[in-house]
Amino acid sequence: MVPVSASGGYDVIAVRYGTRLTTKSDVFLHYGLYGEADEAMQMDYFFWVLRRDGRAILIDCGFNEASGARRGRTMLCPPVRALQRLGIDPADVSVLILTHAHYDHIGNIDQFPAAELIMSAVEFEFWTSPLGTRPLFATSAEAEDVEALRRAHADGRLTLLPKPASVPWPTAHSVAGDLTVVEVGGHTPGQLVVLARTADGEAVLASDALHYYDEARLDRPFAHVADLPAMYRALEFLRELAGDGTRHLVAGHDPEVMHRFPSVADGLAVHIGGACRDGLAGEA
């Protein structure tokens, strides 16, 4: 079990900024193996905000309007505007943790010029290497976003977490003073999970280590995967974290998130804490 700092808790918000319709066969790897009829399903897009003592930390920053439109995604509220609705000036964001480099997680980093960017070294090196341009990987990334990462690195704004000493992962890192990020890989080479203490238990911001709760409930990996054994290990890790009932497990794309936790900002977002604590029990 990976510990989280015992210092004062964060106010944690999951912001739903986009959505689209998809199908189970597009979401779950080799869905036909399960012998079930295909069905439509909704995919929501989130980023996450941590606040305490006037300080704002972002976990990912969503896709931008141009890349979202090209891919047929519905932008409900551009991330910068969503932050403003929450009373946060993007210029005041001090830290932006990037869980991985897919287009819907790093599409607005230039909108946060004062923020220190934090990412796995494994992740950065992969996406800035020739492997990251191979079609089966590049379909999930935008060349402009990767170039923005390169600029941030050249400007000294990007902090790269050290490579894990050994595998299998997960590997924990302490960042931003008292947050823990856990490098699990799987979905991408350096996929991160963020653990943050709240006043009401620990928030496990799984990002795309867990797109949907059913991935962990039913042991069904997501369709886009860089390392399948690591993805299975990440699911085991998240089940372990959720198993003792003291943590709030937050999936990265599941509409269920908006029903599990209390609504804020007229339904723009939810406050992580309170009602639903058992991460895999189903909708609260």
Image (tube, helix red, strand yellow):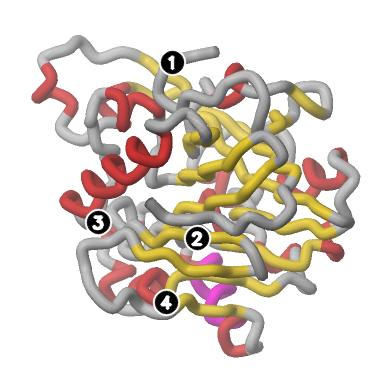
Q: Are the residues tagged 4 and 2 within 8 Å (C-beta)?
A: no
Quickly name the residue at label 4: 121
Please tell me whether mark 2 sits on a helix, a strand or a loop.
strand
Closer to the chain start, of discs 2 and 1, is: 2
Range covered by the magenta-colored residues: 144-151
Please tell me whether mark 4 sits on a helix, a strand or a loop.
helix
Depth check: give the residue in front, 200 or 22.
200
**Res 141 seen here:** no
- Disc 3 marks a residue whose amino acid type is Ala
Quickly name the residue at label 3: 226
Pinpoint residue 208: horizontal percent, then vertical percent: 42, 45
Quickly name the residue at label 1: 282
- Given the current orientation, which residue lies at the most extreme top position? 37
Pinpoint residue 282: horizontal percent, then vertical percent: 43, 15
Magenta stretch: includes residue 272: no
Residue at image x 29%, y 38%?
Answer: 222
**Res 267 seen here:** yes
Q: Which mark is residue 181?
A: 2
Pinpoint residue 81: horizontal percent, then vertical percent: 81, 45
Instruction: Measure the C-alpha gap from mark 3 to mark 4.
Output: 16 Å
Q: Are the residues tagged 3 and 2 within 8 Å (C-beta)?
A: no
- Disc 2 marks a residue whose amino acid type is Val
* Badge 1 density bin: few <14, some 14–19, many ≥20, Cα 10 Å: few
Closer to the chain start, of discs 4 and 2, is: 4
